[in-house]
Image (cartoon, rainbow, N blue to C red):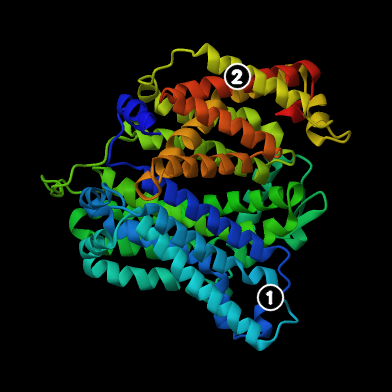
Amino acid sequence: MTDMTTSDNRSAGGAARSWAPALLTGALVAVELALISLLYINNFEFVCEDRAPKAFCGFLSLAPARAFTLFAALALVLLPHRRAALALLAGGPRGGALRWLGLNFAGFALLMSPWFFLTDASGGGTFAAAVFLWLAGAAAASAGAALALAPAATWAGLVRLGGTPLLFALPVAIAAPDLAAFAQQFWKWSPLAEMTFRASAALLQVFEPDAITIPENVALKVGDFGVRVGPQCSGIEGFALISGFTALYIAMFRRDLRFPHVLLLLPIGILLSWVLNVVRIAGLVLLGAHVSPTLAIEGFHSHAGWLMFTLLSLSLAAAAHATPFFRKDRGAKVARSAAPPLPPLSEDWNAARLVPFIAFMATALLASTFFEIPGIAYPLRFVVTLAALLVFWRLLMRLDWRIDPFAAGAGVLIGLAWVATAPEPSADDPLAAALAALPLWAFAIWAVCRVLGTSLLVPVLEELLFRSYLQERLNLSARLGPVAGLLFAVGVSTALFAALHDRWIAAALAGLVFAAFALRRGRIADAIWCHAAANAVIAGFALAAGKWSLI
């Protein structure tokens, strides 16, 4: 492990100050929020309002939305001080990052634990225990994520940078989802609802020509799934939220903005909010018809709106600060901190080992959300993952890419063993049926992307994450000794790698071989060549036999 750190990391331009803590922590928190939302929506046999005041249950149910608005508020307040804020965050955690991520995971486990035992038949004591676990878990998960990203002193510095505006913005952000839910009952403007309905129907029919519109009921339907676009779905709630956010932004940064130019942000924000609401409604119908009605109604319906609001509000603020038309030219920039700035993303070795994998997994989530048969979307995943790798092309080219014949030969043996021990594919494989129905040209594009992605892209992004980044970060040689520390790093990273595969025992054995080659000469490229040779053999068999379940 030491050889890999001193050889590959140095040649790739590794830096102590890195984007990696923010990327890794952000991805972890996003996954946790998604799991909390989805699992507490699906198969959770408990009605909170039967045991507690409606306001309290509403507060709990809006927790994911509150996370979005808190992030938006913090980013808004720190936007004018972004150089100083980035300088404070540049060094990441000063030590013990794994410990804090462990605290985050422990908090997440506490948050999820009531899902396993809380039901409508539970008594008051059981519900009280669940509430305690929720509150304690939220505190631990939040503290762990924050301290894994930066030490307490850094957060104190960010609070000082935010000053009074931050103290005002944070409670408003916490209360925003509750205020929006309360006010929604008063925002019923039928003409706007009618216009939203017609626009949503037109957009939906672009993707589903057979979509049914029922004007008398203001309803949209695809197959057996339909929704009613009532007055509360008109988008006026979004108008109020984005108008309030924009007004707050203008008031807070009035000295840096040009008047009356900046007032144009209000109609721009309202128009974009309405457009995103139309997209959300059409997406809701498509998701409910092709993926899951429960997910569409109880998850996407609310969370997509808050996510879109967060992205729109931050985009408006960033555009205003970056556009001379809206921003005064004060002739001086915010003073730089004495700490060195973050390296450009494309020159950050840690980011190069994280971002492509995050992109690959994010596309998997999107494919499973928006495609009835997720495997059909592989060409889109291929393009996005390739683009993520190309961002770091110069950095990756600094690695020693000379082919190790021994590593490649071992990879061929792994590939042959994987094929020989593969179970027979299911007779009713939906992906096989979908591929058979494709035109020849479309199948050719899909097959090329699948073979190239499996043989070339996946080995690079998986080895960079598991055999380089994680093995380096998990090495506890200082505490356990050089041998035990290395074994711990290899064991945990291999277990995580195996968890991504259906045949986890075979994957774990292959992962151990890849780790051995990464350590043999301290070159991550050797592990990549071994992995690529194995995947190429598997992909070749899959293509020749038409057994895509192999990969």
Instruction: Look at the picture and state if 489 lies above or below 397.
Output: below
Residue 447 visible in image: no
Quadrant of the rendering where the C terminus is positioned:
top right
Residue placed most toward the observer, 370 or 147: 147
* In the image: residue 300, left or right of residue 318: right
Q: Quadrant of residue 507?
A: top right
Percent x, y for residue 152?
A: 28, 63
- The amino acid type of the residue labelled 1 equals Leu
Specify the farthest residue to the left: 331
Quadrant of the rendering where the N terminus is positioned:
top left
- Look at mark 1 in the image and give the residue it sits on: 118
- Look at mark 2 in the image and give the residue it sits on: 410
Instruction: Look at the picture and state if 133 lies above or below 478.
Output: below
Percent x, y for residue 394?
A: 36, 22
What secondary structure is found at the residue carrying circle 2?
helix
Instruction: Look at the picture and state if 349 lies above or below 248.
Output: above
Q: Local crowd at mark 1 within 10 Å, few (<14), some, or many (≥20)? A: some
Residue 330 visible in image: yes
Q: CA distance from mark 1 to mark 2?
A: 50 Å
Residue placed most toward the observer, 169 or 412: 412
What secondary structure is found at the residue carrying circle 1?
loop
The residue positioned 51% from the left and 28% from the top of the image is 516
* In the image: residue 321, left or right of residue 280: left
Find residue 214 and name its label: none
Q: Which callout, 1 or 2, points to the residue nearer the camera?
A: 2
The residue positioned 77% from the left and 15% from the top of the image is 544
**N-terminal-most mark, 1 or 2:** 1
Instruction: Look at the picture and state if 29 lies above or below 375.
Output: below
